[in-house]
Image: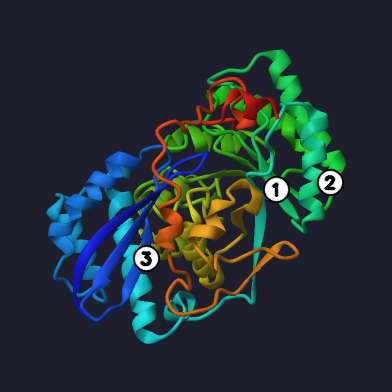
Amino acid sequence: MKITDLRTVIVGNPWKNWLFVVLETDEGLRGLGEATLGLSTRPVEGALHELRRFVLGQDPLAIPRIWERMRQGWYLPTDLVHITAMSGVEIACWDLLGKALGAPLYQVLGGPARDRIPVYANGWYRGRRAPEEFAARAREVVRQGFRGMKFDPFGAAQGVISPREEDLSLAIVGAVREAVGPDVQLMIEAHDRFEVPTAIRVGRRLERFGIAWYEAPVLSTDVEALTQVGAAVPVPVAAGERFAQPADFARLGQGRTVLTWQPETLSVGGVSGIQQVSALAQAYGAGVAPHNARGPVCTAVNAHLATWLPTLRILEYFVVDAVPAATEVLPGLPRVADGVLPLPAGPGLGVELDEAAAARYPYRPDNFMNLFEPGWEHRFLGESEEGRRR
C-alpha cells in the first residue's frame, strides 16, 4: 500500500476550527486523522501541506518509518505546530492499519483493558458567571448521566485574582458541589492562570469541596512551578495538555507531586506518543486522563486509546449539545450513555468524515475565544447581538 495524496479538511464551529487530515492510498483505503491546535489552524494546515513531500509514495502501515521521515525531514522539531501536524498524519496511518487488518484500533494496540470507558463532561457551562447558573447547569449534566464534570470558575483572572473574584470563584464551586452531591467528581480547570503563590492559596481553599483535581493552576509547561504547587496543596494537581514531547512527562514524574497526566493525543505524537506516556506513567505511578477538547476525530481516537490504556483514570468528553456539528460531520462518533462510553466499533477509528457535511461549515476567522477576557464563559463567539440576547 502506498500513500497517493494528503489532504486537509477544515470544519468551522463556534469555538475553534477543526483541522482534519485525509490520507488517500493506491488500494482505495482512506485514513483519517486530526491536527486541530486550539486557535492555530492556518499554521498547522500549512505545515501539513509541507509534509506531503515526506509521506507521498510511502507505505502508511510502516508507522515508525513514516514518523522518522517527517521528524528527520523537519530537522527534529519540538514545537506544537509541527508535532501536531505530524501527529495528524500518524493517527491517519493507524486508521489505515486498522482498516487493512479489519480490526478496531484498540484491538490493533493489544486489546481492551476495560469494557466501558469512564468519562467526565466538559463544555456544559455557557452563561452568566454566577453560582446559581452554574448549579442549574450542573444538575442537568447529572441528569444526562455524567458522574464527573469539569469547569473553570475563575473568570478572566491572570497571574493573580482579586479577593472578590476569588470568593466568587469558590462560591461557584461550592454551589456546584451542593447541586450535584458528594458522589459526582468535580474537576476544577484553571487554564494556566495563576502565579505560584496564588495557585497555592486557591488550591488550599478548594480542599473542602472534595475535588477530583485542580488542573493547570500555573503555566503548564513550567514543570518546576507545577511540582511546587503540587507539593503545597492538599488536592491532586493535573497537567500535561501543552507538552509536545513524551519526555516532558518524565520530568513531571520525577517531582512525584503531579500524578494525574493529561497528554494531548494530537500534540504529543499521536497514538505512539500516548503509548510512550502510558509507559512512563506506569514507571512513575501516575494515571493518564487524556486531554480531549479539540475535535471529533480526536474523540474517536481517544475512545480507542482509553479502551486500551492500562493507566487510564478517566476521559474528557464534550457534551453533545456543546458542538452539535460533531455528529453531523463524523457519523458513528461514540456517544455517552450513563456516564460511560461503549467500546468503539468498526475497523480503524470506526468513523468516516462526511465531507459534504463538512463543506457546510467553512473556516471561521471570528471564533477566537480569549480565556482572559471577561465574559468568555458565555461563548458568544461569532454570534450576532440578537443571538447574544437570546
Which mark is nearer the camera, 2 or 3?
A: 3
Which amino acid does the dot numbered 1 rest on?
Answer: Met
For marks 1 and 3, the one nearer the N-term is 3
Residue 32: give its label.
3
| 311 relative to 207 in the view: left or right | left
3D distance between C-alphas at marks 2 and 3: 38 Å
Q: Is residue 129 above or below residue 185?
A: above
Are there few (<14), some (14-19), or many (20+) residues within 10 Å of tag 3? many
Per the image, label 3 sits on a secondary structure element best described as strand
Task: Please name the residue shown 40% across and 33% down the image.
Answer: 365
Instruction: Choose between 305 and 310: the one closer to the eye.
Output: 305
| 137 relative to 158 in the view: left or right | right
Which amino acid does the dot numbered 3 rest on?
Answer: Leu
Instruction: Choose between 171 and 388: the one closer to the eye.
Output: 388
**Residue 321 picture location, percent across and down:** 65, 49
Residue 149: give its label.
1
Tell me whether the residue at label 1 lies in contact with that at label 2, contact meaning CB atoms closer than 8 angstroms.
Answer: yes
Q: Is residue 275 above or below residue 231?
A: below
Per the image, label 1 sits on a secondary structure element best described as strand
Which residue position is annotated with label 2? 180
Residue 2: give its label.
none
**Residue 371 picture location, percent across and down:** 53, 28
Are there few (<14), some (14-19), or many (20+) residues within 10 Å of tag 1? many
For marks 1 and 2, the one nearer the N-term is 1
Task: Please name the residue shown 43% across and 64% down the image.
Answer: 353
3D distance between C-alphas at marks 1 and 2: 10 Å
Instruction: Choose between 353 and 385: the one closer to the eye.
Output: 385
| 25 relative to 255 in the view: left or right | left
**Residue 311 picture location, percent across and down:** 55, 65
For marks 2 and 3, the one nearer the N-term is 3
